[in-house]
Each structure stands twice: as structure tokens, then as C-alpha cells.
Image (cartoon, grey):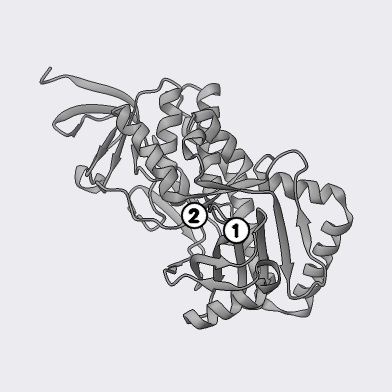
């Protein structure tokens, strides 16, 4: 047993939400998979996650959704407002909720527990210190392994120039994320308001009294707590009543990008593969689509196929580039405030208001069921 070499299909680097869920999905498809994670403890992530209908169904199929119990809140309606159009755009699906909001740590804890129970997670392992390569003998925790493919599911700030070719669209934007307590029931409604300083989203947060919401405001301007508080109160006083911001507000830079590995047998999923401007609220859901596409590729092609990596990347590239271009364009139009930009925005609002086909298309996109 001392010299035994364990042969695995996949090594997943990173046990965040997307990496953990990818491991579970592959394990349930009977593939030999191992996950390594640098951190031994769960991150103290107080943020929430917008889970569209497709991602929710994915979690149901994995058997994880039921374990969330009351730690999620449904989104039954999406309201879009801006400073140019008098009437709001309202989207909802007659037969099911358009998505849900969950606490990041709730889903991550459930996913990690699954990996630990199945004994496929090694924590406290730094990939950079191992210097591993696909299809070569690797030593992890004193055991020898050979992996056919590596899957990287790391934060978008991870850089390794020898393995990745990153296309980053430089931006000076940053996102402010936090919670608000409010007087009125949120009624399972999500809002996206395009202000002159950037898009502001407020989503219903899991709470018994339904009087707590989470917000994300992306902007290129520096803001004080009082300025941010005033902005939210001015835009949501009518719908939410008296509002109080919690003092624990996170701020992080926005780095829209598309990455592609330049080494065979390495796949990228989640944040390291792509990130988009948060105006669409679909960043994490694209990571779920990565997993679903990987599973679909495995149903169609052999893992040893020389073109497997190309098939996977090709199947994901169109949607990822489309979302990146759409969110970037939308943000640019509102920021420029030029006459032509305002005309395009007003025409878009008119089209969504008067053409059911476009409304239904948007609903399917928002639900991830396009």
C-alpha cells in the first residue's frame, strides 16, 4: 500500500461554493474526484446569494436545497426602475418564483459537510506549494495520486501566468454590499434601480418577519456611510418604509473578465473563469451553468477525448461573453448620460413594456432557463 498510486478523474482546486458543488455533482455522476482547499475553516462570509430558478433546481437535484430549510427567501417579482423613465418594469412568473436569496455561509456549510462526509475534501492544502500537473504522479497528504484533469474554482484574483491567460476589462468600479432593516414587508420583491451614480439592487433577505433586505450598489465614486444610507433611503422609502442600514458593509473591487486556460487538461469554472458587472445579479449563477455544462460534456464526450477541453470552453464562451458584454454596455449607457445613451435606454424600456416576447425572454434569462 505504501507505493500505491490512486487514480482519479478530477482534482478540484478550491472548495468555495462553485468548487464544492462541482465536486458533489461529479461525485454523484460516479467520477473519482478530490477537492483541495487552502483554508481549514469556513470563511466568515456574511453576504447573501441570488439563486435563480435554474440554480435552485440544480441544488434540488443534488439533494442540498432541502437542507437550507428556512435559510432562503423566494423572489416572486423583479422591479426595475431608473431616473429616465416614469413607469417601472415589472417581471414575474405566473407558475413559480423567479429565484431565491440564501446566505452564502448556509449553502457553503451544507456543501462542505457533504464533501467531508464522502471523504473527498482535503483542507489546509495550498496548491501553489504542491506544484502539481495533470497526468503526473502527485503527493498529497503522503499519498500518491494521478489526476486526469484539474478544475480550478478560485477567486478571480488568483493569478498564475503559466496556466492562465486572463482578459481583464479594467474598471475603477467597486461594490458596496450590506443589509437594511425596514418597516414594511418586502413581499418577496427584488429591485434594481439605475441611479446616476450606478446600479443599486435590493433583494429580500431570509428573515422571519420579512423586514430585512440585502443590497449591492456598484459605483465608481467613493461614498461615505451617510451618503450610501441617504441614497438607499431616498430610493426605497416608499416601498420599504423607514430604513436603517446595518453598519457592517463590505466593499470590494469589480473586475469584469473572461479567462481561458492555456494548458491542456485544466478547466476553469466560477469566478476565476469569468466575472461580470453585478447589474444583472447573475455572476454566481453562471458558475452553476459551468458545472451543468461540464456534466453535459461528460455525457456526450469521453473525458480522455483530446478535444474535451475545447468542447467545454466553446459551450460556455457564448453565454459568458454575452453576459459580460450586456452588463458592460448597460452600465456604460447609464454612466455616460449622453443624449444617444438616454434615447437607447428609453427605447429599451418602451420595448420591454409593449412587447410580450421581449418580456418573456427577459424572464427566462433572469430565471436561468433560456
Q: Quadrant of residue 266?
A: top left
* Residue indicated by mark 1: 203
Residue in the foreground of this view, choosing between 198 and 140:
198
* Marks 2 and 1, how far apart at CA: 9 Å
User: Who's the residue at 64% across and 51% down the image?
Assistant: 322
Q: Is residue 167 above or below residue 356?
A: below
* Residue indicated by mark 2: 48
Residue in the foreground of this view, choosing between 150 and 245:
245
Tell whether label 1 touches label 2 (CB within 8 Å): yes
Please indicate whether residue 28 sits to the left or right of residue 82 in the image.
Answer: left
Q: Secondary structure at mark 1?
A: strand
Residue in the foreground of this view, choosing between 244 and 111:
244
Q: Is residue 75 visible?
A: yes
Upstream in the sequence, badge 2 or badge 1?
2
Q: What x and y, as percent, mark residue 110?
A: 40, 38
User: Who's the residue at 89% across and 57% down the image?
Assistant: 354
User: Who's the residue at 48% across and 65% down the image?
Assistant: 178
Q: What x and y, as percent, mark residue 361?
A: 77, 47
Residue pushed farthest top?
A: 1
**On-image quarter of the N terminus:** top left
Q: What x and y, as percent, mark residue 142?
A: 13, 31
Q: Is residue 303 visible?
A: no
Amino acid at each position: 500500500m505504501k507505493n500505491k498510486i490512486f487514480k482519479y478523474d478530477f482534482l478540484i482546486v478550491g472548495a468555495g461554493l462553485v468548487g464544492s458543488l462541482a465536486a458533489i455533482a461529479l461525485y454523484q455522476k460516479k467520477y473519482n474526484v478530490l477537492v483541495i482547499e487552502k483554508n481549514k475553516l469556513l470563511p466568515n462570509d456574511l453576504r447573501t446569494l441570488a439563486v435563480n430558478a435554474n440554480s435552485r433546481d440544480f441544488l434540488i437535484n443534488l439533494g442540498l436545497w432541502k437542507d437550507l430549510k428556512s435559510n432562503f427567501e423566494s423572489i416572486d417579482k423583479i422591479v426595475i426602475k431608473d431616473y429616465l423613465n416614469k413607469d417601472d418594469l415589472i417581471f414575474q412568473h405566473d407558475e413559480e418564483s423567479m429565484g431565491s436569496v440564501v446566505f452564502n455561509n448556509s449553502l457553503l456549510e451544507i456543501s462542505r459537510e457533504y464533501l467531508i462526509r464522502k471523504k473527498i475534501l482535503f483542507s489546509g492544502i495550498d496548491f501553489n506549494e504542491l506544484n502539481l500537473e495533470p497526468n503526473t504522479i502527485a503527493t498529497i497528504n503522503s499519498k500518491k495520486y494521478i489526476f486526469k484533469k484539474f478544475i480550478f474554482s478560485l477567486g478571480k484574483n488568483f493569478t498564475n501566468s503559466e496556466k492562465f491567460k486572463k482578459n481583464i476589462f479594467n474598471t475603477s468600479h467597486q461594490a458596496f454590499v450590506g443589509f437594511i432593516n425596514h418597516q414594511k414587508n418586502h413581499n418577496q420583491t427584488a429591485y434594481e434601480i439605475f441611479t446616476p451614480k450606478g446600479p443599486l439592487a435590493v433583494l429580500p433577505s431570509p428573515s422571519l418577519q420579512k423586514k430585512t433586505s440585502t443590497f449591492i450598489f456598484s459605483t465608481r465614486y467613493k461614498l461615505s456611510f451617510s451618503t450610501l444610507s441617504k441614497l438607499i433611503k431616498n430610493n426605497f422609502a416608499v416601498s420599504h418604509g423607514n430604513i436603517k442600514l446595518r453598519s457592517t458593509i463590505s466593499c470590494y473591487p469589480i473586475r469584469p473578465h473572461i479567462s481561458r486556460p492555456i494548458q491542456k487538461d485544466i478547466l476553469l469554472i466560477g469566478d476565476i473563469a469569468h466575472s461580470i458587472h453585478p447589474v444583472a445579479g447573475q455572476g454566481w449563477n453562471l458558475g452553476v451553468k459551468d458545472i451543468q455544462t461540464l456534466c453535459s460534456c461528460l455525457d456526450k464526450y469521453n473525458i480522455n477525448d483530446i478535444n474535451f477541453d475545447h468542447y467545454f470552453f466553446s459551450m460556455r464562451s457564448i453565454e459568458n461573453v454575452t453576459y459580460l458584454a450586456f452588463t458592460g454596455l448597460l452600465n456604460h449607457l447609464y454612466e455616460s448620460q449622453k443624449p444617444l445613451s438616454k434615447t437607447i435606454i428609453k427605447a429599451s424600456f418602451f420595448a420591454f413594456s409593449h412587447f410580450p416576447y421581449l418580456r418573456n425572454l427577459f424572464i427566462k434569462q433572469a430565471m436561468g432557463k433560456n
